[in-house]
Image (cartoon, helix red, strand yellow):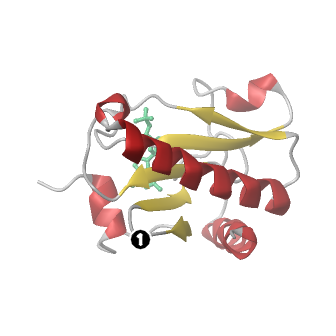
Amino acid sequence: MATIFSRIVAGEIPCHKVAENDEFFAFLDINPVALGHTLVIPKKEVDYIFDIDDPMLGRMMAFAKRVAHAQESAIACKRVGLAVMGLEVPHAHIHLIPITKESDMYFGGKKLEISQEKLAEIAAKIQKEYK
Ligand code: 5GP
């Protein structure tokens, strides 16, 4: 059965898309820990990120880098932090999180409540900056 993220890529489940190329897809996390919290995934289904072969993992990181630069341009932050967990969704993904302080990357707390309109606005801003 397709993962929830494959269903997002297929357009069966809505998302706020940020960027896409032949191999990878980036979209806003549904439960953001910070404004602009984005997930980068391979379109090919792989559960564990460290099972991805070296060349593809390199391309995934290069794609994530371009998304991160777009986030930096679109959202006020000091840096974009990167995290990999994969405990919830068995489809490899990188969390890219605009941060100004360490605690902005805390996953154990209450998630931000952001309206769909605001999420759409944030996604459009990042998308516009993606080069
Ligand atoms: P992890 O697997 O890295 O522990 O966490 C999975 C992440 O995917 C979580 O931050 C969660 O909010 C996000 N997520 C789970 N389901 C969906 C979904 O249907 N849409 C979006 N946009 N994000 C999701």
Name which residue lies at 24% across and 52% down.
3
Ligand 1 is within 8 Å of the C-beta of the residue at disc 1 = no
Q: Residues within 10 Å of mark 1 (few under 14, many from 20)?
A: few
Q: Name the quadrant of the C terminus.
A: bottom right
Q: In the displayed structure, would residue 87 be above or below residue 120?
A: above
Residue 112 horizontal/vertical position (percent): 67, 45
Task: Provide the residue designation for mark 1.
Answer: 14
Give the camera-side residue of 60 and 95: 60
Q: Quadrant of residue 34?
A: top right
**Left or right placement of residue 1 versus residue 127 in this view:** left
**Left or right placement of residue 60 versus residue 1 in this view:** right
| Residue 42 visible in the shown view | yes
The amino acid type found where label 1 is placed reads Pro
| Residue 16 visible in the shown view | no
Residue 50 horizontal/vertical position (percent): 35, 29
Q: In which quarter of the image is residue 33?
A: top right
Name which residue lies at 29% across and 54% down.
4
Q: In which quarter of the image is residue 73?
A: bottom right
Q: Name the quadrant of the N terminus.
A: bottom left
Residue 127 horizontal/vertical position (percent): 66, 72
Q: What element carries label 1?
A: loop
Q: In the displayed structure, would residue 17 be above or below residue 45?
A: below
Question: Quarter of the picture for ligand 1?
Answer: top left
**Left or right placement of residue 43 versus residue 58 in this view:** left
Residue 106 horizontal/vertical position (percent): 66, 26
Name which residue lies at 47% across and 67% down.
15
Residue lying furthest front in this view?
Answer: 55
Residue lying furthest left in this view?
Answer: 1
